[in-house]
């Protein structure tokens, strides 16, 4: 059962099918443009969508809003330093701000960044710095149906080749995303992280963690990796941070706050460069674009997130939804993680070609049938087409992510998701695809306009 009781409730919108049809047309079938009050169950993202605890709200009341040197900053800094072991801690208003500052300070045009999988904004910030982002997912990640527990690992042989090869001198950093969101929310093993750290040290390349979901990764390590069954998630997380040279984090995930993030570093020179850019673009180094109350709530959230009872319930509710989805006749990327389920839309809609976006078709159908908002992670997100709409590059898989907000929805809400998918699966052949009518040259899935084929 949930290790908490509900103190405050918020009504959710209940709309009609006709209202949802009209809403989809109005936003040109881009679910990002829906108003929140048109969405019944919002599984678009787990970023900043969690429910605060009473202790976090109480901590926020202690917020010191001094411009420089606030008490809130020092409470936050000490909490993060104790967790990560890094001596240099810089707050930022969210993860992509931390990425921009870190990459702008670390990278030079033409540099290469290697990763188990870059997420969309991470890749964008690498490319905006005039650099190249290369993904090296492990071979096991290609099998969506296997129960292999650590599909989020980096391909160590590929990493070794890249670091030792002709482009090795151009590699400015290796980023390990834990858990691997772009790879289906799959965890990274401690052994894989340890070997990647060893390779990076031998080649003089910094290893950085994209630590947005560090606690969920740690939980899965304690469940599945030999030698860690008797360790706490907190102990595993501390070990992971200390294997790396630094991190960037969106605390809107495993900080369980609505806004916030940070950079943690061992290197004093790099930290100084980041601090100068932070002050110029985000705010003074002791607030980084955040209110004091945000810093205090983030510090408390970082303590709560590694509690075994919290993580056990989060894993259980993800498993509950996964089973409902399987019973509905829809395949998912196995095994299910904690922060999201990834639906195999390509398998559900084999009649829709990649350049007509089967994942987006499923996302729209989920909204139309059940008022459920989700995110496509397929060829709309990763693909490319020529000016006539013909495919140039398609995604390897056509997926839809159901992101699970922290401490927000109950099992009955997720049962509604399962029933909606069951109805869609029974008439899958009647669902059609989409074509793009307008798009942005970067991160197109956020602002794209489409129409049904």
Image (cartoon, grey):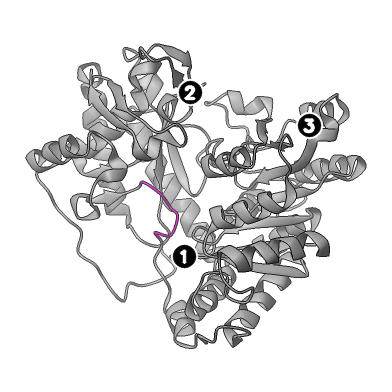
Q: Is residue 88 above or below residue 218?
A: below
Report the residue marked by disc 3: 159
- Of badges 3 and 2, the one in the foreground is 3
The total number of labels drawn is 3
Q: Quick check: can you spot residue 55?
A: yes
Left or right: 441, with 449 as reference point: right
Magenta range: 44-49
Q: Is residue 47 part of the magenta span, yes or no?
A: yes
Q: Nearer the viewer, residue 187 or 68?
A: 68
Provide the major secondary structure of the magenta segment. Answer: loop
Q: CA distance from mark 1 to mark 2?
A: 31 Å
Disc marking residue 397: 2
Q: Is residue 132 part of the magenta span, yes or no?
A: no
Q: Position of residue 57 (x, y in %)?
A: 42, 80
Q: Splitting the image into 4 quarters, where does residue 452 fall?
A: top left
Q: Splitting the image into 4 quarters, where does residue 28 fall?
A: top left
Q: Is residue 329 above or below residue 17?
A: above
Quick one: SS at disc 1?
loop
Nearest to N terminus: mark 1 or mark 2: 1
Report the residue marked by disc 1: 259
Residue at horizontal 29 percent and vertical 27 percent from the top = 361
Crowdedness near tag 3: few (<14), some (14–19) or many (≥20) residues, C-alpha within 10 Å:
many
Q: Nearer the viewer, residue 206 or 440?
A: 440
Residue that lies at the very extreme toward the front in this rendered image = 280
């Amino acid at each position: 059962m949930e290790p908490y009781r509900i103190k405050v409730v918020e009504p959710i919108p209940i709309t009609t099918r006709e209202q949802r049809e009209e809403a989809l047309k109005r936003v040109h079938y881009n679910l990002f443009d829906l108003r929140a009050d048109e969405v019944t169950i919002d599984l678009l993202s787990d970023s900043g969508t969690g429910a605060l605890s009473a202790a976090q709200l109480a901590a926020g009341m202690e917020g010191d809003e001094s411009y420089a040197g606030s008490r809130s900053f020092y409470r936050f800094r000490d909490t993060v330093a104790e967790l990560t072991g890094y001596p240099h801690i810089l707050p930022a208003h969210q993860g992509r701000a931390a990425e921009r500052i870190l990459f702008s300070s670390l990278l030079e045009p033409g540099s290469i960044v290697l990763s188990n999988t870059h997420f969309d904004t991470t890749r964008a910030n690498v490319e905006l710095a005039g650099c190249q982002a290369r993904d090296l997912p492990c071979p096991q990640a290609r099998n969506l149906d296997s129960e292999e527990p650590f599909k989020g690992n980096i391909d160590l042989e590929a990493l070794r080749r890249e670091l030792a090869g002709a482009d090795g001198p151009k590699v400015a950093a290796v980023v390990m995303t834990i858990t691997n969101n772009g790879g289906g929310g799959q965890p990274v093993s401690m052994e894989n992280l340890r070997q990647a750290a060893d390779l990076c040290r031998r080649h003089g390349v910094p290893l950085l963690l994209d630590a947005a979901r560090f606690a969920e990764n740690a939980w899965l390590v304690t469940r599945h990796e030999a030698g860690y069954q008797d360790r706490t998630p907190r102990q595993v997380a501390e070990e992971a941070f200390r294997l790396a040279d630094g991190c960037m984090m969106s605390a809107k995930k495993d900080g369980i706050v609505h806004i916030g993030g940070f950079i943690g570093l061992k290197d004093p020179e790099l930290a100084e460069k980041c601090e100068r850019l932070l002050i110029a673009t985000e705010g003074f180094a002791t607030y980084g674009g955040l209110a004091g109350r945000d810093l205090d709530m983030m510090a408390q959230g970082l303590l709560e997130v590694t509690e075994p009872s919290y993580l056990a319930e989060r894993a259980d509710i993800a498993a509950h939804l996964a089973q409902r989805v399987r019973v509905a006749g829809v395949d998912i990327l196995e095994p299910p993680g904690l922060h999201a389920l990834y639906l195999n839309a390509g398998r559900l809609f084999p009649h829709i070609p990649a350049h007509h976006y089967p994942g987006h078709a499923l996302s729209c159908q989920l909204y139309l049938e059940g008022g459920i908002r989700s995110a496509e992670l397929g060829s709309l997100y990763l693909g490319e087409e020529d000016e006539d709409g013909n495919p140039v590059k398609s995604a390897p898989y056509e997926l839809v992510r159901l992101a699970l907000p922290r401490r927000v929805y109950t099992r009955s809400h997720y049962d509604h998701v399962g029933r909606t998918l069951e109805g869609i699966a029974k008439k899958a052949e009647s669902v059609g695809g989409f074509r793009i009518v307008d798009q942005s040259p970067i991160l197109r899935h956020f602002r794209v306009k489409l129409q049904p084929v």
